[in-house]
Image (cartoon, rainbow, N blue to C red):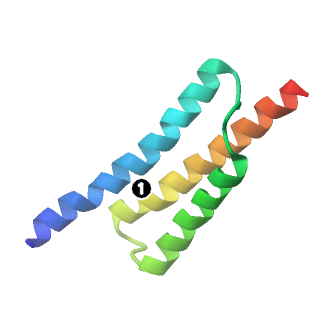
Amino acid sequence: MPQELIQIIGFFPAIIFPLASITQLFVMYQQKSAKGVSITAWVMVAVANVSLYIYTQKYDELQSILALLGAASLNICVVLLALHFRRQDM
């Protein structure tokens, strides 16, 4: 496979992973609720993204930074917002 195509394909997860988290954040914020959101699952996804970033050792590649660290940061935002809404419901 040509290297250029591999680079382009590398941007798919760099866009999709953060977009999935942003979508969840948007829905939670819009509904002002974390009902149905698994905090445990989102924490595990964040840990998995950081672990995969370390494992791949592609520390200077934009695709890895966006897809893995960017998504992990957004995953943590989902967790924090979920905790915030759950505290409000108490």
In the rendered image, which residue does mark 1 sit on? 66
The image shows residue 82 at horizontal and vertical percentages of 72, 37
Q: Residue furthest right?
A: 90
Residue found at x 9% / y 73% = 1
For badge 1, the amino acid type reads Leu
User: Tag 1's secondary structure?
Assistant: helix
Residue 37, by quadrant, is: top right
When the figure is inspected, residue 85 is found, relative to residue 78, above or below; the finding is: above
Q: Residue at x 43, y 80 (%)?
A: 57
Q: From this viewpoint, which residue is outermost toward the left?
A: 2
At x 19%, y 58%, the residue is 8
> Residue placed farthest to the top in the image?
31
Q: Quadrant of the C terminus?
A: top right
Q: How many marks?
A: 1
Tell me: 12 left or right of 2.
Answer: right
- Mark 1 burial class by Cα count in 10 Å: few <14, some 14-19, many 20+: some
Work out whether residue 14 or residue 38 is closer to the camera in this orientation and state it: 38
- Which corner quadrant of the image does residue 43 belong to? bottom right
Question: Residue 21 versus residue 60: which sits nearer the camera?
Answer: 21
Q: Is residue 59 above or below residue 71?
A: below
Residue 23: x and y in percent read: 49, 34
Looking at the picture, does residue 58 appear above or below residue 16? below
Above or below, 82 relative to 18:
above
Residue 77 lies, in percent from the top left, at 64, 43
Q: Quadrant of residue 87?
A: top right
